[in-house]
Image (cartoon, rainbow, N blue to C red):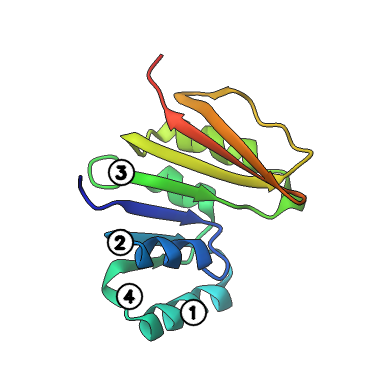
Amino acid sequence: MRQQVFLDLYAGTGTVGFEALSRGAKKSVFVENNPERANMLKKIAEKLGFTEKCSIIKENAENFISKTDLNKDLFDIIFIDPPYHADIIENILNIVAEKNIIHDNGIVIAEHFKKKVLPEKIGNLRLKKSYRYGDTMLTFYERGDT
C-alpha cells in the first residue's frame, strides 16, 4: 500500500492534516486563506519536524481546487471543514467531484453542522457513512464511477 497524500481544505490550525502526518501520511497539503493562520501552520510544521512533508497554500479552497493539476495532484484523503455559517459545503464538494482530484480508492470527509443534510451522491462521489458527535457531523464519501 502506498503512503497517502492528505488534503486539508480550510486547514485552520491544521490539526487534522498534522494528525495524518503523525499516522504515516506521505504528505499533507494545507489550504488556508487566512495569512496569519497559514504562517502559523508553517511554524507548527517546523516545530513538529514535518516541513518536508507539508505544502502550505495561502489561498481560497475553491480557487486552489480549480487550479489543481490533474496530472500531478491526486489525493487519497480530502478533509473539508469550511466555516459552518458560510454554508458552502455542498459547493466545495461539487468542485472536488467535478475536478476529479481523488485517487480511485480515496475518500472525502466533510465536517459540517448536524442539521445540514448532505446528498447521497455528488458527481462521482457516493456517500459511504456519517457520524454525529455533538453538533457536528462527519460525512464520508467514496469515489465511485457509477
Where residue 39 is drawn, which disc sits there? 1
Query: N-terminal of the two: label 4 or label 1?
Result: 1
Q: Residue at x 43, y 67 (%)?
A: 18
Residue that mark 3 sits on: 74
Residue that mark 4 sits on: 50
Mark 3 touches mark 1? (CB < 8 Å): no
- C-alpha separation, residue under disc 4 versus residue under disc 1: 14 Å
In terms of depth relative to the viewer, which is nearer, 69 or 124? 124
Q: Residue at x 32, y 75 (%)?
A: 50
Amino acid type for the residue under numbered disc 3: Leu
Amino acid type for the residue under numbered disc 2: Gly
Q: Secondary structure at mark 4?
A: loop
- C-alpha separation, residue under disc 2 versus residue under disc 1: 23 Å
Query: N-terminal of the two: label 2 or label 1?
Result: 2
Give the left or right position of residue 145, taking residue 71 as reference. right
Q: Secondary structure at mark 1?
A: helix
- C-alpha separation, residue under disc 2 versus residue under disc 3: 17 Å
Q: Position of residue 44 (x, y in %)?
A: 45, 80
Dot in front, 2 or 1: 2
Amino acid type for the residue under numbered disc 1: Asn
Residue that mark 2 sits on: 24
Query: N-terminal of the two: label 4 or label 2?
Result: 2
Q: Residue at x 44, y 65 (%)?
A: 19
